[in-house]
Image: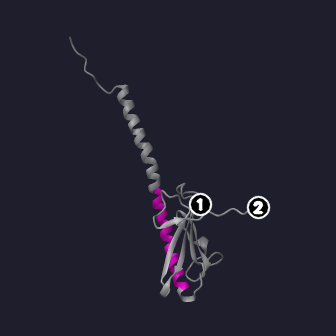
Amino acid sequence: MKSKLQQGFTLIELMIVVAIIGVLAAVAVPAYQDYIAKAQIAEAVSISGAVQSEVAVAFAQDNVCPDNSSAAVGNIAKFDAIKGKFIASVTAGGAAASGCKVTALYNTTGVNSKLSGKKFVYTLATGSNNVTNWTCTTDVETSIRPKTCEALAAATPPVAN
C-alpha cells in the first residue's frame, strides 16, 4: 500500500501566518508614522534655526525684535517666503520685554496628520551679561514632541458677560 505524501500547507497553517503578519503590521504602521512625523519635525528646527540666528543678531545690535509679518526685515525674508516641504511659513516678531519669537507653522496638507497646522514657537530670553537662550513651545502631541520643547499653553476662551 502506498502512502500519500503531504504536499503544501494546510488552511489552518496559512491562516496562522496571515494572523501573525496582521498583528505585526498593526504594531509597525503607527510606529512608522511617528518616525515619519519626527523626521518632519527636523525641518521646523532647521528652517527656524536660521531665522533665530538673524533675530539674535538684530536683537543684540538694536535691542529690537525684527518683525517679518508684513515685509522682509534685514536678512530675514517675509514670513510666507520662508518655507519648506512641510513648513508653510516662519514668522519673527514679539517685543523685547517679553522676548523675541520665531514661529514655524506646518502645512495643513502633505504633512503627517499629527503635524498638520501645528506650530513651534521659539522665544529668545536674555539673561545676565546679555547671554541669550532660546526656549521652545509647541502644540505637537507629547508622543512626537522633542524633549527640548514644552507644551504650548492652550488659549483660554473669552468669558461671556
Q: CA distance from mark 1 to mark 2?
A: 28 Å
Give the residue pinned by disc 2.
160
**Position of residue 121 measured from the top left corner of the image (x, y, whole percent):** 56, 69
Above/below status of 145 relative to 33: below
Q: Which residue does the image show at 40% across and 35% down from the upper left?
A: 18
* Nearer the observer, 57 or 158: 158
Q: Secondary structure at mark 2?
A: loop
**Position of residue 61 measured from the top left corner of the image (x, y, whole percent):** 54, 88
> Callout 1: few (<14), some (14-19), or many (20+) C-alpha neighbours within 10 Å?
some
Residue closest to the far left: 1
Q: Quadrant of the C terminus?
A: bottom right
Q: What colour scheme was applied to this rendering of the protein? A: one colour
- Mark 1 or mark 2: whose residue is earlier in sequence: 1
The mark lying in front, picked from 1 and 2, is 2
**Visible in this render: residue 72?**
no
Give the residue pinned by disc 1.
117
Q: Which residue does the image show at 47% across and 70% down from the upper left?
A: 46
Say which amino acid is labelled 2.
Ala
* Nearer the observer, 98 or 44: 98
Q: Which residues are magenta?
A: 36-59
Q: Which residue does the image show at 37% across and 34% down from the upper left?
A: 17
**Visible in this render: residue 147?**
yes
* Nearer the observer, 142 or 27: 142
Above/below status of 20 relative to 133: above
Above/below status of 30 relative to 119: above
Predominant secondary structure in magenta? helix
Above/below status of 140 relative to 52: above
Q: Quadrant of residue 94?
A: bottom right
Q: Which residue does the image show at 37% across and 27% down from the upper left?
A: 12
Q: Quadrant of the N terminus?
A: top left
**Position of residue 113 measured from the top left corner of the image (x, y, whole percent):** 55, 54
